[in-house]
Image: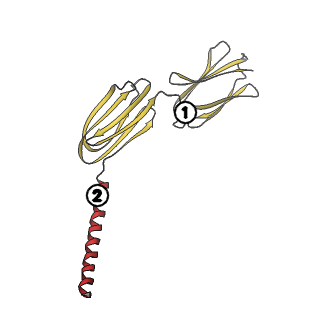
Amino acid sequence: MNAIMKHSIKNLLALLIVFSATSTTFAVDSVYMATVCKIVAEQEKMYRVMFYAPTEENVSVQIKNSNDQIVYIESLKSSEFVKKYDLSYLPKGTYEMEVKSAGYSIKEEFELGSVKGFNFDLSQLEKKSVSLVGSHAQGKDMTLYILDGNEDVVYHEGFDDTKQVHKRYNLEKLSNQKVTFLLYHDDQLIKKQAFDF
């Protein structure tokens, strides 16, 4: 009786081990078979979509504006793709990109032409000079205009990358005692500051 019971317990343990191994394999396979998609902002107006599915699927990529109107739609049949989307043709505003296939959907909201995140300080220094220090985490482009007392542009400069900016402007050659600094992103004013020397 004792030997039969030991034999039964061994068989039961062997079955449990086989069952556990099968369950683990199934769990790993189901994770591996998942559909995955990422929407990545490469620049303010350039987005990259990376899509992977275990089988070929009908995939749609659509962009809606803040009024819930579709401004772009594309249909693809693929199991995986990486595509870039240049959105520079769209007017400024808030948008939502959605990538969806059978049983899968991902949405990403973004804003074009936003001046949020610009952090710049202008400080008056000795000898008729001004320092410009600041940054934008995404490095969005910016344009600087310096106006004289008559509001004529005496200097302008474009910054393609604003992740870190530290500049000094010597204005000793200007005959006017008043200057105004204007910082723009696209056509939107980020900062305006006047100095009297």
Q: Residue at x 32, y 55 (%)?
A: 31
Residue of label 1: 117
Instruction: Give the quarter of the figure containing the N terminus.
Output: bottom left
The x, y position of residue 180, in whole percent, is 65, 20
Q: Amino acid at mark 1?
A: Gly
- The quarter holding residue 169 reads top right
Is residue 170 found left or right of 60 in the rendered image?
A: right
- The quarter holding residue 164 reads top right
Q: Residue at x 32, y 27 (%)?
A: 70
Instruction: Give the quarter of the figure containing the C terminus.
Output: top right
Q: CA distance from mark 1 to mark 2?
A: 43 Å
The x, y position of residue 146, in whole percent, is 63, 21
The x, y position of residue 93, in whole percent, is 44, 25
Q: Amino acid at mark 2?
A: Asp
Callout 2: SS: helix
The x, y position of residue 9, in whole percent, is 27, 79
Callout 1: SS: loop
N-terminal-most mark, 1 or 2: 2
Q: Residues within 10 Å of mark 2 (few under 14, many from 20)?
A: few
Q: Nearer the viewer, residue 52 or 22?
A: 22
Residue of label 2: 29
Q: Which label belongs to residue 158?
A: none
Most distant residue in the front direction: 1
Q: Residues within 10 Å of mark 1 (few under 14, many from 20)?
A: few
Q: Residue at x 28, y 32 (%)?
A: 74
Is residue 125 found left or right of 29 in the rendered image?
A: right
